[in-house]
Image (tube, rainbow, N blue to C red):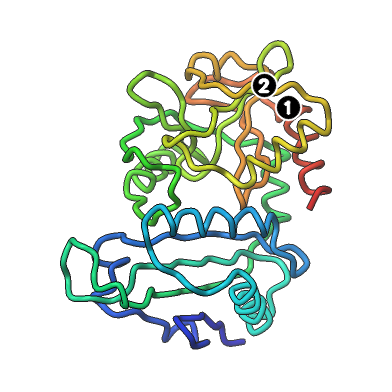
Amino acid sequence: MSRYAYVNSAFVPHRAASVHIEDRGFQFGDAVYEVWSVRDGHLLDEQGHFERLYRSLDQLDIRFERSQSAMQVTIHELLRRNRIREGLVYLQISRGVAPRDHAFPATNTPPTIVLTAKRFSFSAAGRRAEQGVRVITHEDERWDRCDIKSVNLLANVLAKQAAREEGAYEAWLVDKAGLVTEGSSTTAWIVNADGELVTRPLDNHILHGITRKTVVAVANAMSIPLIERAFTPAEAKSAREAFITSASSFVMPVVQIDNKMIGNGAPGSLSLSLRDEYLRAQ
């Protein structure tokens, strides 16, 4: 079966999909993106991802005039053409194609839209959750507007690569104050000795995770106490449980941070309960 992508206004074979070499996403990283998980043909946390997309576009003053409903139609047609019921959808919107200049191009420059979709094994992710994952700590070298979901991800890439080189699943980024911000592509959580969920509050230094938002709602519905504050790597290593959240990992238990086992080295019961309730809520 041929794979299809969507570039601007056309569905094209994935192998032939391309953008111009002077697209500002390629030249400057002047673009934003979103990722949806797809289960049984349904976009998980659909509305939250769209709201964050349009906020990111607004923060960067990228003028994108297509409505959410029009984009939903396009996404579902892409899924239909690729016959995907379980997978991931990636959307990227750049400021468009223009002669290379750091300043914005003319206001009538149309943005570039790219959509791709692929199959993804959520059962494999479920098996990983049953075992838990290891994370490492890594210096946070990113810019000060991490709340914007831009494609400027080089620091994230280097952190993720450092994790892979150490045989870990993720890297938790640590700021200059010695506090955990978030993972290279995930939100960081711990469960303290009192059974309270702890995660960093929303600010410009972390991405406003959509899965995070849903997990907060799930925790409230389960009457689990939640504290939004930063924590240190040392506190995380002595926590009762730890886990990460993201659009593709949902709630993923963390069983080791650097060389320190968390709890008894097995996925925590609260983490697994939150994962189950999150999936039930979708």
First along the sequence among labels 2 and 1: 2
Q: In the image shown, does 90 or 162 lie closer to the viewer?
A: 90
Q: Which disc is residue 105 wearing?
A: none
- Going by the numbered disc 1, the residue's amino acid type is Gly
Residues under numbered marks 2 and 1 in contact, where contact means CB atoms less than 8 Å apart: yes
Looking at the image, residue 155 sits to the left or right of residue 217; the answer is left
What residue is shown with label 1? 268
Could you say where residue 115 lies in the image, as x and y percent from the top left?
51, 73
On screen, residue 193 versus residue 207, left or right, reads right
Quickly name the residue at label 2.
Answer: 191
* Percent x, y of residue 46: 67, 59
Give the x, y percent position of residue 250: 67, 46
Give the answer, above or below, for where 277 lies relative to 93. Answer: above
- Quarter of the image containing the N terminus? bottom right
Q: Amino acid at mark 2?
A: Val
Q: Nearer the viewer, mark 2 or mark 1?
A: 2
Nearest the eye: 83 or 97: 97
Label 2, secondary structure: give it. strand
Identity of the residue drawn at 17% across and 70% down: 100
Q: Residue at x 60, y 24 (%)?
A: 228
